[in-house]
Amino acid sequence: MATFTERMAPVLVLWLAVCLSGTWAVDKGNFKTCDQSAFCKRQRALKPGESPYRALLETMELTNTRLTLQLINDNNKVRLLLELYRLQGNITRVKINELKPLKPRYEVPDVLIREPPTEPLSLLSQDENGVVLSLGPVSQRVIVSARPFRLDIMEGRDVLMSLNSRGLLAFEHLRMRKDTFSYKVTSTVASVWDNIKRVFSSQADPEAEKKEEADPANQAETPKEEEEKVEDGMWEETFKSHSDSKPNGPSAISLDFSLPGVEHVYGIPEHADTLRLKTTDNGDPYRLYNLDVFQYELYNPMALYGAVPVMLAHNGQRTTGIFWLNAAETWVDISSNTAGKTVFGKMLDYVQGSSETPQTDVRWISESGIIDVFIMLGPTPKDVFTQYASLTGTQSFPPLAALAYHQCRWNYNDQEDVQTVDAGFDEHDIPYDFIWLDIEHTDGKRYFTWDPHKFATPKEMLQGLLDKKRKMVAIVDPHIKIDSNYKIHNEIRSRGFYIKNKDGGDYEGWCWPGSAGYPDFTRADMRAWWASMFTYDQYEGSMENLYTWNDMNEPSVFNGPEVTMHKDAVHGAWEHRDVHNIYGFYVQMATAEGLIQRSGGVERPFVLTRAFFAGSQRYGAVWTGDNAAEWDHLKISIPMCLSLGLVGISFCGADVGGFFKSPSTELQVRWYQTGAYQPFFRAHAHLDTPRREPWLFGPENTALIREAVRQRYTLLPYWYQQFYHAHRTGQPVMRPLWVEYPQDPATFALDDEFLIGRDLLVHPVTEEGARGVTAYLPGKDEVWFDVHTFQKHNGAQNLYIPVTMSSIPVFQRGGSIIPRKLRVRRSSTCMEHDPYTLYVALNPQRTAEGELYIDDGHTFNYEKKDFIHRRLSFANNILSSVNLAPDAQFSTRSWIERIVILGASKPSKVTFKSAG
């Protein structure tokens, strides 16, 4: 039987792969709607109204750092504990948990980079209706209303945000199932024990019983069990053929937030949707639940591969943010009192003197855990980025080569194929830095191994790339082939590192290798062991120029519910439902740590992940998953990456050309032109698609693609500088226009163009057969220069730009200085010592500013002040530089060989003065 199973396993995997690859559109029936997700349906059935929760002001305790207060649900008498903190940097933290849960509820670890430092809270006033606390700056305060419970955060007379103003706070308390034997025994024993305690305590102290009853902390703790209604899906749930045993019963949480004056909200990736989030009144909420969605649909709120529960709200006066720290399945409802109103309707309101203030209401619903929310009060977009970075960290600083071009497909067949593709780039004079290997490079989908026939001498292959100063990425997925002859499997099983099923055995599911186990990356000891597998002696055939790609880490389970893991699988003390959205975060964390450790902590890692969570920015790059060779997928790559940048993940890109299907020649060229101006620049393609290396589309199109890739390489100094700033400050690299022009309503919904840093504006051509595009150039008193023609255009206008197939509309902001390297070589490392050209674009005041940042491009030595960082300034016809880091030390063989000044007339003479 074992032999039969071993022989059948490849057949079953092949069948599964054929089924998947043969279907070119997502089967929406494989994924739940809110109505099919019991807790979402249950919570969404609650309609706005008066909240059953009230604050018990007599239980309030206020210390220098926090306020605690009990809440009671008057319907079932369950008590909750509210904790409120004022954090450094204009952040307010609100936590709500059961006062006395049956067992601990999950609180997300490891995402926050530290316990957030607090600032003093002070009591301004208190009466029987509530309390008012000072939040410190500019008359900010929080009002806690008692009946019903509500929180309002105010600044002066303005309400910035309200919590539970619509009465949708819900907290399903943990309970024992009433129809079980254990419940009946426990309740009987508890009743007897309470009577015994009451008898003895009253004999010892006749007043004790009265004191106990008078204590607010002991009043009405026991739920009114007779009033609790058992609904379908509370204790078990079925979806298709899969059942979820729900041993802990219902545990969902929900809270609403009202945002007066706000019409535009953003974030909560990952969704294939517009940058500005839509209202969800007439459909499903936005879903956050990491899933392997095969060729996803566009413009809907379905869950995708990653989940970052962070939302930004913006108007012309203020930007705020909400960070909902919960790793369980989450749904987000959005409604607005201006939704559906036309521009004419809004004008009519204005003319008629309508007093209705725009307002957006947001409701978060999660399946388990606690309410732990960070309210980031801005007031500017950059303040919100700084606030979020102070909580979860900043984008990791990638090696410079990782910002160059990557060539990938599923799969390069063997070492000879790799060598041929590598040579093809040289033959056609197209630079590239990384070539990638997908799952077929392994020995039977056993990760950390090489196919003994197709990749027999991996070090020889890697050395050949290293000789050309190029690198490779190989895939390492977190599903492990169950095979007693496979070292990795044996180690994980012997150490007990696999996730368990609900019955205590190792959880098994189907993925690329066939039957697979799933390591429990929530365990620190498992992550440490995984990291140790990347050392050169453990990962045989690896070298210093081999980096890693973590795919399928949602986790993907082909035969699981919604193509993922059963929620009642077990991670130590927790169910998978509690930790699901953080699994991929931990996989990338452990992998990045492995790449750092293998170099003794010297070299920066590069790890690409498909699944992600809040904080994933600390460990590498993400991409938008299994897209398709369609024009709409090219367009959607822009808002998808913009949304990720707003929540800290700057290193984002989409598969150039589309993963599924075959792009037309025009689409292929336009996608290269777009991808060259997005942070992560990688071409990738499905196993079943025709080969599409850049030179396979005819000489004319090869030249167009070459030019797009070369433009990327000339701008690598600027890209690298932007990632340095993202790493230091948390500001996004690729950003929406409203981030830099927060008072310009014309920018608030734009998502077909974007900024790189402050100074480059890009409007890619994403329409088939386009003969022109209209770009909005912001800034009333600003000017913008076409980077190709140097033509000057005024800001605050919609500019029509005629385009041909060679056009990539890119503009440099007047008042900026951008460094480039114009000697493009076969890889970025070959350009390390080449000279710089400075492009100085003058503003109407004939001044400009910029920076030049240089380090070794690959180690952590920059943390030891081993870099050059200079401020460049042009004023009064003088270009000068100032050292921004006088205590830093770094020497470079590069120099500035050319200065191009845009917006200036030809000088009669030029004088050079050196400080040396």
Image (spheres, helix red, strand yellow):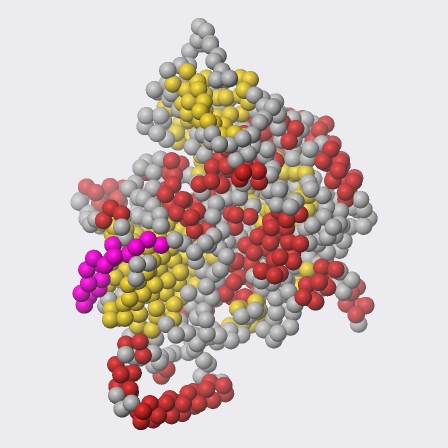
The rendered magenta stretch, by its main secondary structure, is classed as strand
Return the residue nearer the eye: 18 or 848: 848
Residue 279 lies, with reference to residue 213, above or below; the image says above
Q: Determine whether, in the image, residue 693 is placed left or right of residue 53.
A: right
Residue 147 lies, with reference to residue 457, above or below; the image says below
Residue 360 lies, with reference to residue 778, above or below; the image says below
User: Going 62% across and 42% down the picture, which residue do you hit?
Assistant: 602
Q: Is residue 129 magenta?
A: yes
**Is residue 584 among what the camera can see?**
no
Residue 48 lies, with reference to residue 773, above or below; the image says below
User: Going 29% across and 75% down the picture, which residue do you hit?
Assistant: 74
Q: Give the percent coordinates (x, y) of residue 107.
A: 46, 63
Q: Determine whether, in the image, residue 536 is placed left or right of residue 864.
A: right
Return the residue nearer the eye: 26 or 712: 712
User: Going 35% across and 29% down the picture, which residue do you hit?
Assistant: 779
Q: Which residues are magenta?
A: 118-134
Q: Give the percent coordinates (x, y) of residue 633.
A: 53, 43
Q: Determine whether, in the image, residue 754 is placed left or right of residue 362.
A: right
